[in-house]
Amino acid sequence: MSKIPGAPNIGLEPKGETDVLYELRCAAMAGIMACAAAIAPGAAGAATGQTAHEFAFTSIEGEPLSMEQFAGKAVLVVNTASRCGFTPQYEGLQTLWETYRDQGLVVLGVPSGDFGNQELSSSGKIKEFCEVNFAIDFPLTEKTEVSGDRAHPFYAWAGTELGAAAKPRWNFHKYLVGKDGRLITWFSTTTGPSSERVQSAIEAALAE
């Protein structure tokens, strides 16, 4: 598989300074994050009565992408970036998609430049990067803000539902949405797609 000329040599070069700093922060906060992850879904935030099915994105092709179309399926929503030290997680996300999609899993990538400005400038470039470098064929949204006052409504809602500890702090943060549209749990950047925690949670969601 030929890589796009000029694309970062993912997996071979040292991670950027911002990624290293992120990992150091994660190590310092490991105990706090572990405790937060153990909190029952919804307990850390204020439940709004809404579900994920009430929100919509714009696809990377520029078409409406309603979460309602995923009713009856589990959805792993991941804010992604093309020039991040964690970009190789795309490979694990594609593997999850291929492994569980026939059982009802959707992997939804949400490209974002919010953290370290590590996403490419246009939907066309992002789509090409993902297809050429990782053979991605799961759904992707257009480049989207996922943090701060201008966060997409889905992300603003998720932060209210699960609390501040569950908000994205870097690229490749993950939310798991159940078949009924409720938020089940979340995973920090450093919890990769191939981890037992992620796969066990997905299998439990698909069994509901």
Image: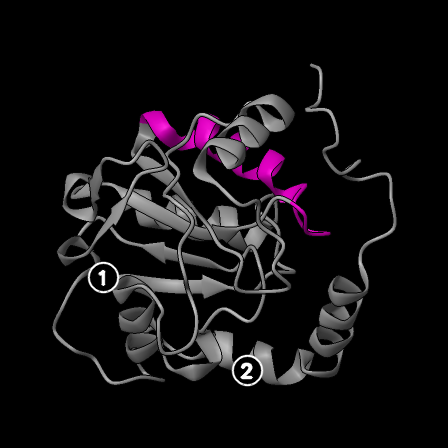
Q: With respect to residue 56, does 101 lie above or below?
A: above
For the stretch drawn in magenta, what is the main secondary structure?
helix
Whether 98 is among the magenta residues is: yes
Left or right of 95, for residue 163: left
- The residue under the point 33% across, 62% down is 184
Residue 147 pos. (x, y %): 43, 71
Q: Residue furthest top?
A: 1
- The total of numbered circles placed on residues is 2
Determine which residue is flagged by label 1. 182
Q: From the viewer's side, name the closer residue of 139 and 70.
A: 139
- The residue under the point 63% across, 54% down is 118
Left or right of 57, for residue 48: left
Q: From the viewer's side, name the closer residue of 183 and 152.
A: 152
- The residue under the point 20% across, 40% down is 64
Whether 124 is among the magenta residues is: no
- The range drawn in magenta is 83-102
Determine which residue is flagged by label 2. 35
Q: With respect to residue 116, does 123 lie above or below?
A: above
Q: Indicate which disc, 2 or 1, sits on the residue closer to the N terminus.
A: 2
Q: Secondary structure at mark 1?
A: loop
| Amino acid type assigned to the residue bearing label 2 in the image | Cys
Residue 181 pos. (x, y %): 20, 55
Residue 65 pos. (x, y %): 22, 41
Alpha-carbon span between mark 2 and mark 1 = 21 Å
| Amino acid type assigned to the residue bearing label 1 in the image | Arg
Q: From the viewer's side, name the closer residue of 32 and 19.
A: 19
Q: Secondary structure at mark 2?
A: helix
Residue 168 pos. (x, y %): 49, 68
Left or right of 158, for residue 190: right
Q: Residue furthest front?
A: 121
